[in-house]
Image (spheres, rainbow, N blue to C red):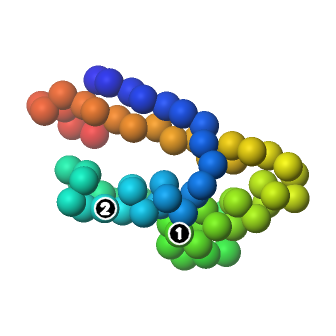
Amino acid sequence: MILKASSRANGNDLATHLMRIDENDHVAVQELRGFVGSNLHDAFAEAEAISQATKCKKYLFSLSLNPPKNAQL
């Protein structure tokens, strides 16, 4: 399995990318916990607002999985 991780900012762009079904083989939000917003864009906007108060520059951690075709996740 190939894992690619990075810390990053700009949650709006990441949320848009993650939800694109034309660029991703499979898209599913399993759960959003601890946010007022009920969708990915709103949750990432909330994380960005918190980061501005703390002066954090890269407030998100992103992990991409590329499992083998026969793997069951």
Looking at the image, tell me whether mark 1 or mark 2 is earlier in sequence order.
2
Residue 53 placement, left or right of 12? right
Q: Position of residue 30 (x, y in %)?
A: 41, 59
Q: Could you tell me the amino acid type at mark 1?
A: His
Residue position for label 1? 41
Depth order, front residue of 14/28: 14
Q: Residue furthest left?
A: 70
Q: Residues within 10 Å of mark 1 (few under 14, many from 20)?
A: some
Picture quarter containing residue 58? top right
Secondary structure category for the residue under label 2: loop
**Would you say 49 lies left or right of 36 here?**
right
Camera-side residue of 25 and 13: 13
The residue at 20%/50% (across/down) is 25
The structure residue drawn at horizontal position 51% and vertical position 41%, both measured from the top left corner, is: 62
What numbered label is drawn on residue 71?
Answer: none
Is residue 14 visible in the rendered structure shown here? yes
Q: Disc 1 to disc 2, how far (Cα)?
A: 12 Å
Left or right of residue 64: residue 73: left
Q: Quadrant of residue 22?
A: bottom left
Across and down, in percent, residue 35 comes to 66, 68
Q: Residue at 54%, 33% (x, y): give it.
A: 6
Q: Quadrant of the N terminus?
A: top left
* Residue 54 x/y as whole percent: 87, 52
| Residue 33 seen in the figure | no
Q: Quadrant of the C terminus?
A: top left
Q: Secondary structure at mark 1?
A: helix
Residue 58 in the figure: left or right of residue 10: right
Residue count near mark 2 (Cα–Cα under 10 Å), binned few <14, some 14–19, many ≥20 = few
Q: Which residue is mark 2?
A: 20
Q: Tell me which amino acid carries mark 2.
A: Arg
Query: Measured from the top left, where is residue 32 in percent x and y?
Result: 54, 63
